[in-house]
């Protein structure tokens, strides 16, 4: 093995930052900084209901290799939660201050270009990244600014503009790539994202790109997962079983999508 092959793609730092709640939470996170000089773009990576996993690390690795700084918070440990359907916050909205605390941390970092900070998230974290794209939630924490790009993965798309707290529209001026799986049993309809976008204003529709991954269940990009859970949010709120199954080919494609999307959305000026 050569010296170059032995080099890590990024240096790892374990950090904490305060959320932007009225009484802040202290949130631990993994910060990965690729080698190089000068300010770089950064991506905030939000875990799902189960908590931090190898899924987030996989995206961090490919983004680091492409020159992005990444931050992976553990939002559940700060709350004493174990994850899963019974171990997650009661509402999605209560995690939005975590998102903006993380962004403030990145914006203050000397190696981060504050104009090029994106956010991506999975399932529960995907919901937070959807809500952060709206003026309603963004402007409460970051008036006059916003994330440069949004990439939510399988964020229970059926819930938006149907369930209280999931209002989606009046979006900030930034691109959003929404990725779902055709076999996702939370939505139980591969066309639900198309229906969601169709109901938005023309201006909002222009900011959104959809990608429905074929032969992909919920959590298709989580290595090793092959479980069936019961969740009241499944089957468009009717409840029931939801299968989560890893699809390596879809995972590789999603990794490429993430690098291509954030690279295109956050080109240096």
Image (cartoon, helix red, strand yellow):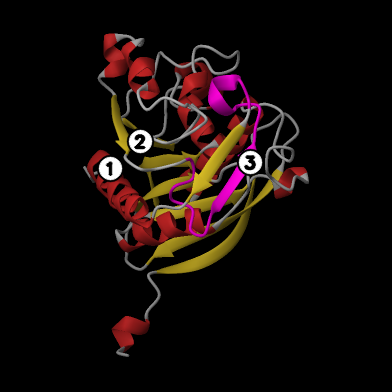
- Of residue 28 and residue 198, the one placed in the foreground of this image is 198
Q: Residue furthest right?
A: 80
Does label 3 or label 2 sit earlier along the sequence?
A: 2
Residue 134, quarter of the rendered image: top left
SS of the residue at dot 3?
Answer: strand
Above or below, 263 against 145 in this view is: below
Which residue is identified by label 1? Answer: 261
Does label 1 or label 3 sit earlier along the sequence?
A: 3
Camera-side mark, 3 or 2: 3
Camera-side mark, 1 or 3: 3
How would you rate the neighbour count of disc 1 (Cα within 10 Å): few for under 14, some for 14-19, many for 20 or more?
A: some
Residue ID at (26%, 39%) = 265
Q: Is residue 78 left or right of residue 259?
A: right
Above or below, 154 against 207 in this view is: below
Which residue is identified by label 2? Answer: 149
Quarter of the image with the N terminus is bottom left
Which residue is identified by label 3? Answer: 229
* Magenta highlight range: 218-239
How would you rate the neighbour count of disc 2 (Cα within 10 Å): few for under 14, some for 14-19, many for 20 or more?
A: many
């Amino acid at each position: 093995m050569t010296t170059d092959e032995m080099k890590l793609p990024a240096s790892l730092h374990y950090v904490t930052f305060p959320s932007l709640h009225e009484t802040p939470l202290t949130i631990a996170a993994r910060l990965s900084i690729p080698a190089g000089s000068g300010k770089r773009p950064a991506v905030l990576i939000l875990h799902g209901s189960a908590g931090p996993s190898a899924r987030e690390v996989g995206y961090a690795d490919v983004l680091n290799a492409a020159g992005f700084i990444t931050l992976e918070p553990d939002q559940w440990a700060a709350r004493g939660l174990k994850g899963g359907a019974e171990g997650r916050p009661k509402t999605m909205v209560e995690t939005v201050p975590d998102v903006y605390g993380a962004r403030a941390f990145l914006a203050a970092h000397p190696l981060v270009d504050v104009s090029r900070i994106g956010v991506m998230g999975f399932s529960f974290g995907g919901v937070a990244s959807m809500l952060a794209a709206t003026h309603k939630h963004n402007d409460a924490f970051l008036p006059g600014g916003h994330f440069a790009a949004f990439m939510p993965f399988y964020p229970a798309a059926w819930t938006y503009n149907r369930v209280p707290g999931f209002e989606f529209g009046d979006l900030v001026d930034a691109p959003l790539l929404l990725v779902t799986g055709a076999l996702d049993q939370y939505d139980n309809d591969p066309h639900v994202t198309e229906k969601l976008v169709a109901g938005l204003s023309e201006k909002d529709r222009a900011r959104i790109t959809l990608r429905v991954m074929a032969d992909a269940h919920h959590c298709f990009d989580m290595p090793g997962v092959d479980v069936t859970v019961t969740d009241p949010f499944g089957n468009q709120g009717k409840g029931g079983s939801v299968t989560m199954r890893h699809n390596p080919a879809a995972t590789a494609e999603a990794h490429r999508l993430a690098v291509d999307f954030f690279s295109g959305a956050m080109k240096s000026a």
